[in-house]
Image (cartoon, rainbow, N blue to C red):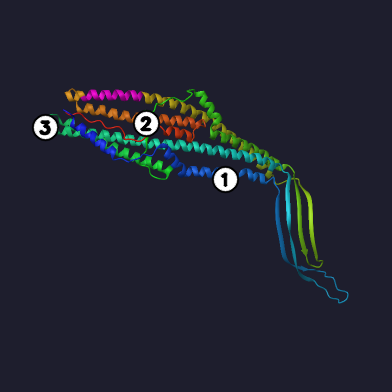
Amino acid sequence: MPNRPAILTLCLLCLLALAGPARAEGLWEVYQLAWENDPQLKASEATLLAARQARPKAMAALLPSLAASGTSGLNHFEDKNPPVDPKTGASRPNQDYDSQKYGLYLTQPVVNLQSWVGLPQAGQRQEEAEAHYRASLAEFSLRLLERYLRVLAAEERLHWVRAEKLTIAQALRRARRANELGLTTPTAEQRAQAGYDLAEADEIAAENRLENSRDELRELTGVPLENLAHLKPSLALAPPQPNDLAHWQRLALTQNHALLAKEHALEAARLEVTRQRAAHAPTLNLTASHYYENTGGRVPGEDLVSSVGLEVKFPIFEGGAVTAQTREAGHLHDKARQEYESLRRLTSKRASEAFRGANESLRRARALEQALKSNLTALRATQREVELGASTMVDFLETLRDLYRGRRDLIEARHEHLLNQARLLQLAGALDQRHIHELSRHFQEGPLPSLVATPDQ
């Protein structure tokens, strides 16, 4: 005779699956949404655009500057020994008069070592900003993937916790009936009740975990996403290609964007030492002016003057500021060198960890796949034993709990393998939107696997 509770359970699950959202958001769609709305990514883009002005600013110090200026004033002149007019005998000790001066002034730097050194230094600063931006793009891709998979893992966990709770609830009802009929001891009902209470507590924790993970994803996208496409079970996991640690460490030390940014920062700090030291050198400017001047007073005049000349400046003593600034730049250069070496070692270490993590998560996922098959076989055997009276419902629930938890562990191991692969690509400077787009093809819509019903007693 057909197992009626099992049939009813499967029908209920089918109805729940059909009642779900019509369309799930895939990884690529969520990535594009986050690309448009993530504040951190927008801030990184604005920082890059600002840093790209470093080269024009440095070039401006080498180009001519042209200024127009003018003055107009009311002057009061007082002569302590005014001349006396021989005809009238009068004198004018006080006099008020107007004056004007306006014109154009041109300055062209000819020799200025500080400005010349500032130009390649600005180039290094801009390259540093470009590398930082590429690093932020890779970090954004990894952050999006992590939060997306975290939501999926939370959904899977909640699904299987509810499956466990539903199964225990069925067992609890049967244990109560059996206890009422005197077919078993109260212990079976009490153990089923304890299992149900624990499953209910796990469900509350899983619901909270799911909401938190959705909030983290919404922080990137700016909008809530309730239905996401899940990873295809048919996705075949593979080790890093090539599966060679030395290869990935070499890529990480030569192509990592954050490390390249530190290299440019180190070179810019070295050039800063040279630039500050160049403040001791003389400067030579070409100057030109063309101005009109109108002066009143005792000897009034009106002039139109044009001039061209060279202006030389020899720094002799500036209170020790140049020496102090040069020493400061030297210490900052040492600091930049130590920071570069620290990041270099950290990058190599993280590349090793990501490489080993990718292979470890792959082996763990394969072991969990085999364990899941064994758990399913054990569940079927225990179900037959319960139906024959050779095992108790408690034995069946424990086996079923192992099956559900093994399923959750397998999903999380597959997700962790994808994340380790992405971390390895990020460290090697190869994680970009193309990788996310390619990975998104392995996600699909559809309900989660159906639940397992309990056998009749």
Residue marked by disc 1: 50
Residue type at numbered disc 2: Lys
**The label number, if any, that marks residue 181 in the structure image:** 3
State the image coordinates of residue 142 (x, y, percent, origin top left).
46, 35
- The stretch of residues the image draws in magenta is 367-383
Report if residue 374 lies within the magenta region: yes
Q: Main secondary structure of the magenta part?
A: helix
Residue 99 versus residue 75: which sits nearer the camera?
Answer: 99
Q: Residues within 10 Å of mark 2 (few under 14, many from 20)?
A: few
Compared to 186, does 58 lie above or below?
below
Going by the image, does 174 lie left or right of 279?
A: left
**Mark 1–mark 3 CB contact (< 8 Å):** no
Residue under the image location 16 percent in, 32 percent down? 186
State the image coordinates of residue 105 (x, y, percent, origin top left).
73, 54
Compared to 202, does 241 lie above or below?
above
* Residue 156, picture quadrant: top left
Numbered disc 2: secondary structure: loop
Going by the image, does 337 lie left or right of 106?
A: left
Q: Residues within 10 Å of mark 3 (few under 14, many from 20)?
A: few
* Residue 73, picture quadrant: bottom right
> Mark 2 against mark 1, which lies toward the viewer?
2
Residue under the image location 63 percent in, 45 percent down? 56
Going from N to C along the chain, the mark reached first, 2 or 1, is 1
Numbered disc 3: secondary structure: loop
Going from N to C along the chain, the mark reached first, 1 or 3, is 1
Going by the image, does 53 lie left or right of 150?
A: right
**The label number, if any, that marks residue 232 in the structure image:** 2
State the image coordinates of residue 226 (x, y, percent, origin top left).
35, 42
